[in-house]
């Protein structure tokens, strides 16, 4: 009889573990709507110098003592390389990002999934163009290695922002300058908010008025790893043009004056970022 | 030392038991313009064949077996062409000492009536959903059996890699065996419960602009009982399955449920069975994008009379996992010997009534939108006891079997059939079949070894010869209209038989379809070996086993079947 009780208990546990009961809604509609194209102007293409724009992702946390030091490295690199470097401060979902105690909540599902993909469990850690996860001590060298290369894609983000309704319209123009031998080339559209003042752990204790830079606020269209540009293509040939249009309302939670769109062209098979672009909406 | 080894070796051989069976089906096809088979249909593929060999080895508590299969088939063969290929389709090893049993390899098993788990193989359908994995059986005390298993299911020769993982556990308690006080009671009771879960890795599915959530783990559970009291028997099983959006149910998230119940009475010369079932959204597959009956984990038992005669068997019922409610009533009575009606040898009477309807579905309105079967919603509501208006199938038939004299035996049967071709065969807008059938069979024993059998059938269809057919709907009238069929068989027991038969669709509304389907067969049986050759025409139709059906095209040719076992 004792055996049977154990077995019945095991059956119940097994049953509970093996059912994923979902709740409504069972689907999510696209968070962005279709929109009209915002055309490129002559200045947009004239300003493009043909060099690659590199992405530095800073996996960080509000309760991570050493993270402000890493953020400073990122800011210095951006000062050095200007528009050829885009920084995203990514807050995943470990204890170090937990807002309990009046800390700001910068956690995102997208950031958490990126974090899990790269198996990051210690902070600060970063990736340069989504290659291996590396400690902040190596960022300067790694960014230096890739900066200055030729851009495989000319990536330009055009935007129109309507203050009264907070509607943001985007047209992201990607023109391939080189052949890209991948059957899954994607465009990821990220939201980023700069200069947010809030609590942060530092080596000197809690700073209640810390300036959080380059805070990743999630993907604009809810597509964590981006949208495939041409699902039928085995590769993308040089000369091909893609225009991706969308519109959405910028959440009241974000400061539109410090709001940016960061666009990324990636090879989804390797996750490598081929080209990045940044646009301040105001 | 050598002597010991030799003795040990000899012992093993003496205790070992090897069994097996082989079957080879060969076909040769030819063009037959009369039934629309052109050179293009055959496309040079005149020879086809398929076969298997199964060998099982047993030594004490240990059993191991393999099954090798080979297929060289075409559309004309009426088997799924994905089976083409050759290989080891099934292998397993089992150790079972009565208390504990373990099997590794390809497993065939079922929990209860199979509602949430049944793996089986059906050669005539080319169906095999065996589970490649591990099974453990534990019998802690007399009358208690607990089974646990996991693995991935077979689909033709496809890699097992992308199939979902199936895990299941089942417990059965035979109270009369395990409780001493119940050992000899009149009431017999067995209780059982099972739980099955499948795992698929995808968490999301993108369709159009929307992203649909997917359950990675879909659980199904069932409870059952079998009660017997004297001549009465009552058995029931209820199963439920949580949200399982799939291509089969148009990605709706409603829970599935199924009830199967049976009440029976039997005594010498009389048997009565009443059965009922309700199926609601119970397609349960280990890959959610599969259709038809591919990778089915659960099985829906059919509650219909299985017709073996060639005309009514063209209209066999296929169970509807998305929803059906059915009943069946069967009564068998033998009028005793040496009575006025029974005559010298007694008379057997059988009556069967079965009907299957759709379930009733009510719309769920969300923000003023009717979400009936809408992807990404609950799909519909369905009151448990309400029967849907649409009838899928109804059959009532009556059979008399009478031995007239020492040498003569007569069987007569009447069948009244309603067959919703649109649902069962998936032919949109097809007119339902409302047909009557008459069947008669006479067997004459010429002497101890020689006998002659004559079978005559007629079908009266509601579609008449003169009905005008929309040219776009011709596909739905291939086997409609009246039919006549006969079969004459001569048997020399126990080794030889020869037969000729014809089916004639003389009442087809399309003149080109008024075809004869002549066949001739010849067979030889010796011990465990059977060789049969048949030639002629095969009509288009459904081949069904246990409510699972496959459509076979019309063909013309010769086939050879050899089966043997040892």
Image: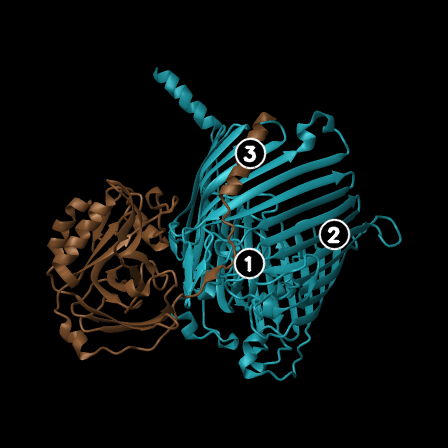
* Badge 3 vs badge 2, beta-carbon distance below 8 Å: no
Which residue is drawn at the image coordinates 33% and 49% (left, top)? A92
Per the model, the C-alpha gap separating discs 1 and 2 is 40 Å
Tell me the quarter of the picture where residue B71 sits: bottom left
- Give the secondary structure at mark 3: helix
Q: Whole-percent x and y of residue B148?
A: 51, 37
Q: Residues within 10 Å of mark 3 (few under 14, many from 20)?
A: few
Q: Is residue A22 above or below residue A168?
A: above
A269 or B538, nearer to the observer: A269
Which residue is drawn at the image coordinates 22% and 59% (left, top)? A273
- Identify the colour scheme used: by chain
- Give the secondary structure at mark 1: strand
- Give the secondary structure at mark 2: strand
- The chain that appears brown in the image is A
Per the model, the C-alpha gap separating discs 1 and 3 is 59 Å
Q: Are marks 1 and 3 on the same chain?
A: no
Q: What color is chain B drawn in?
A: cyan
Q: Which residue is mark 3?
A: A9
B257 or B123, nearer to the observer: B257
Q: Which residue is mark 2?
A: B274
Please, which chain is the residue tagged with disc 3 on?
A
Q: Is residue B359 left or right of residue A66?
A: right
Q: Which residue is mark 1?
A: B522
Please, which chain is the residue tagged with disc 1 on?
B
């Amino acid at each position: 009889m004792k055996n049977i009780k154990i077995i019945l208990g095991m059956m119940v546990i097994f049953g509970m573990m093996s059912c994923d009961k979902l709740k409504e809604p069972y689907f999510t509609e696209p968070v962005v709507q279709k929109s009209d194209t915002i055309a490129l102007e002559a200045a947009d293409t004239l300003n493009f110098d043909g060099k690659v724009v590199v992405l530095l992702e800073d996996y960080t946390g509000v309760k991570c003592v050493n993270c402000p030091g890493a953020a400073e490295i990122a800011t210095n690199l951006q000062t050095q390389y200007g528009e050829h470097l885009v920084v995203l401060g990514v807050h995943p979902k470990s204890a170090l990002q937990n807002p309990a105690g009046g800390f700001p909540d910068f956690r995102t599902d997208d950031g958490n999934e990126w974090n899990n993909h790269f198996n990051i469990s210690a902070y600060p850690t970063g990736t340069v163009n989504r290659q291996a996860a590396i400690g902040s001590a190596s960022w300067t060298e790694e960014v230096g290695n890739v900066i200055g290369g030729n851009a495989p894609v000319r990536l330009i983000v055009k935007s129109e922002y309507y203050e009264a309704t907070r509607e943001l319209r985007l047209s992201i123009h990607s023109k391939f300058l080189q052949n890209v031998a991948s059957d899954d080339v994607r465009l990821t559209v990220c939201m980023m908010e700069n200069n947010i003042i809030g609590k942060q752990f530092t080596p000197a204790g809690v700073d209640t008025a810390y300036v959080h830079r380059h805070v990743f606020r999630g993907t604009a269209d809810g597509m964590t790893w981006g949208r495939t540009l041409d699902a039928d293509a085995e590769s993308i040939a040089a000369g091909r043009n893609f225009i991706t249009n969308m519109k959405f309302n910028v959440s009241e939670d974000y400061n539109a004056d410090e709001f940016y769109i960061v666009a990324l062209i990636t090879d989804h098979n390797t996750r490598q970022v081929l080209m990045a672009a940044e646009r301040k909406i105001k | 030392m050598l002597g010991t080894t030799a003795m040990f070796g000899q012992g093993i051989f003496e205790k070992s038991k090897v069994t097996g069976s082989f079957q080879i089906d060969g076909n040769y096809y030819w063009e037959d313009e009369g039934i629309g088979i052109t050179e293009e249909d055959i496309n040079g593929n005149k020879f086809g064949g398929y076969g298997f060999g199964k060998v099982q080895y047993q030594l004490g508590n240990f059993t191991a077996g393999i099954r090798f299969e080979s297929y060289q088939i075409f559309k004309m063969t009426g088997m799924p062409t994905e089976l083409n290929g050759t290989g080891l389709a099934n292998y397993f090893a089992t150790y079972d000492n009565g208390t504990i049993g373990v099997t590794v390899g390809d497993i065939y098993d079922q929990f209860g009536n199979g509602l949430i788990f049944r793996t089986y193989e059906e050669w005539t359908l080319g169906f095999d959903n065996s589970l490649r994995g591990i099974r453990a059986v534990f019998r802690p005390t007399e009358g208690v059996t607990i089974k646990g298993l996991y693995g991935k299911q077979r689909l033709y020769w496809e890699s097992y890699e992308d199939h979902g993982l199936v895990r299941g556990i089942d417990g059965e308690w035979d109270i009369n065996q395990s409780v001493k006080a119940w050992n000899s009671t009149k009431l017999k009771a067995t209780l059982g419960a099972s739980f099955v879960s499948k795992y698929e890795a995808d968490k999301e599915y993108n369709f159009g602009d929307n992203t649909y959530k997917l359950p990675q783990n879909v659980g199904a559970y069932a409870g059952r009982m079998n009660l017997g009291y004297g001549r009465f028997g009552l058995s029931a099983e209820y199963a439920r399955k949580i949200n399982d959006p799939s291509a089969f149910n148009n990605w709706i998230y409603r829970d599935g449920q199924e009830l199967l119940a049976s009440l029976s009475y039997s005594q010498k010369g009389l048997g009565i069975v009443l059965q009922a079932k309700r199926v609601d959204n119970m397609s349960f597959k280990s890959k959610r994008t599969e259709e038809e009956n591919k990778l089915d984990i659960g099985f829906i038992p059919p509650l219909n009379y299985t017709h073996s005669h060639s005309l009514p068997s063209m209209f066999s019922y296929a169970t509807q996992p998305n929803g059906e409610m059915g009943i069946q009533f069967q009564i068998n009575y033998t009028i005793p010997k040496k009575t006025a009606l029974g005559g010298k040898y007694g008379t057997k009477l059988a009556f069967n009534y079965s009907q299957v309807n759709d379930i009733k579905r009510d719309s769920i309105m969300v923000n003023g939108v009717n979400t009936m079967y809408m992807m990404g919603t609950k799909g519909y509501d369905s009151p448990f006891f309400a029967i849907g208006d649409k009838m899928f199938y109804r059959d009532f038939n009556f059979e008399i079997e009478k031995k007239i004299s020492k040498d003569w035996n007569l069987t007569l049967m009447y069948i009244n059939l309603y067959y919703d071709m649109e649902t069962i065969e998936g032919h949109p807008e097809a007119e339902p079949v409302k047909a009557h059938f008459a069947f008669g069979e006479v067997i004459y024993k010429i002497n101890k070894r020689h006998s002659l059998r004559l079978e005559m059938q007629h079908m009266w269809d509601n579609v008449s010869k003169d009905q005008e057919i929309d040219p776009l709907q011709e596909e739905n009238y291939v086997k409609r209209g009246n039919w006549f069929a006969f079969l004459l068989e001569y048997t020399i027991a126990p080794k030889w038989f020869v037969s000729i038969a014809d089916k004639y669709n003389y009442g087809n509304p399309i003149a080109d379809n008024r075809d004869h389907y002549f066949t001739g067969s010849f067979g030889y049986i010796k011990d465990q070996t059977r060789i049969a050759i048949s030639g002629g025409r095969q009509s288009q139709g459904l081949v069904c086993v246990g409510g699972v059906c496959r459509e076979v095209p019309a063909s013309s040719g010769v086939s050879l079947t050899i089966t043997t076992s040892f």
